Amino acid sequence: MQIDGVNLMPQMNSTNAGAQGAQMINEAASFQEQLKAATKNLETSESKKNYIMTDDEVAQRNKEIKEASVQLEALLLKMMYTEMWKTVPKSELFNDNNAMEIYRDMYNEEITKKAAEAGGIGLADFIYRQLTETDPHKLY
């Protein structure tokens, strides 16, 4: 990672330095590639500033916004469920072990996906309305 020409590397001990260092370099390279692609897309979209979207493009964009809104609500609900489960006292009666925690995490993920798809707490609809309330045909 580089900031203003200065290399920044987190502290690593000798047992994990090689693997973590290589992983960080790969992630940084991947991030740089994604950043370059996003910048290129932004530059091309700037040249299309007055581009008018077709009805099909608007429908596709709105579908993608709706899916992303539902996914965000599901993620936030899952985080909420996970934190709520932390308040439940652990007990040998319910066999709270690592396998049970993994199962509970998978269960929470699925139940929150279904809840968000069914309307959840209304966050997805709110986000969708906020992102689509402007002129749907103009690409900004």
Image (cartoon, helix red, strand yellow):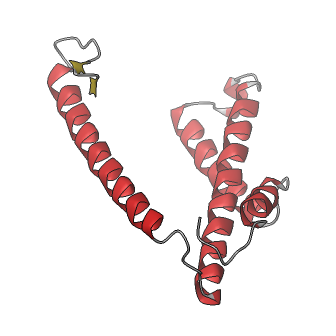
Left or right placement of residue 37 versus residue 25 in this view: right
In the rendering, at what x and y percent does residue 6 appear? 23, 18
Which residue corresponds to the image point at 68% horizontal and 67% vertical from the top-left? 66
Which residue corresponds to the image point at 63% horizontal and 51% vertical from the top-left? 109
Q: Residue 94 sits in which quadrant?
A: top right
Question: Which image quadrant: the N terminus?
Answer: top left
| In the depicted structure, whether residue 138 falls above or below residue 42 | below
In the rendering, at what x and y percent does residue 26 appear? 21, 40
| In the depicted structure, whether residue 50 falls above or below residue 7 | below
In the rendering, at what x and y percent does residue 11 appear? 27, 11
In the rendering, at what x and y percent does residue 96 appear? 63, 30
Query: Which one is in front, 60 or 54?
Result: 54
Left or right placement of residue 2 versus residue 58 in this view: left
Query: Which one is in front, 91 or 45?
Result: 45
Which residue corresponds to the image point at 59% horizontal and 70% vertical from the top-left? 139
Which residue corresponds to the image point at 69% horizontal and 44% vertical from the top-left? 76
Question: Which image quadrant: the C terminus?
Answer: bottom right
Q: Residue 42 sits in which quadrant?
A: bottom left
Query: Which one is in front, 119 or 9?
Result: 9
Task: Give the total of numbered labels.
Answer: 0
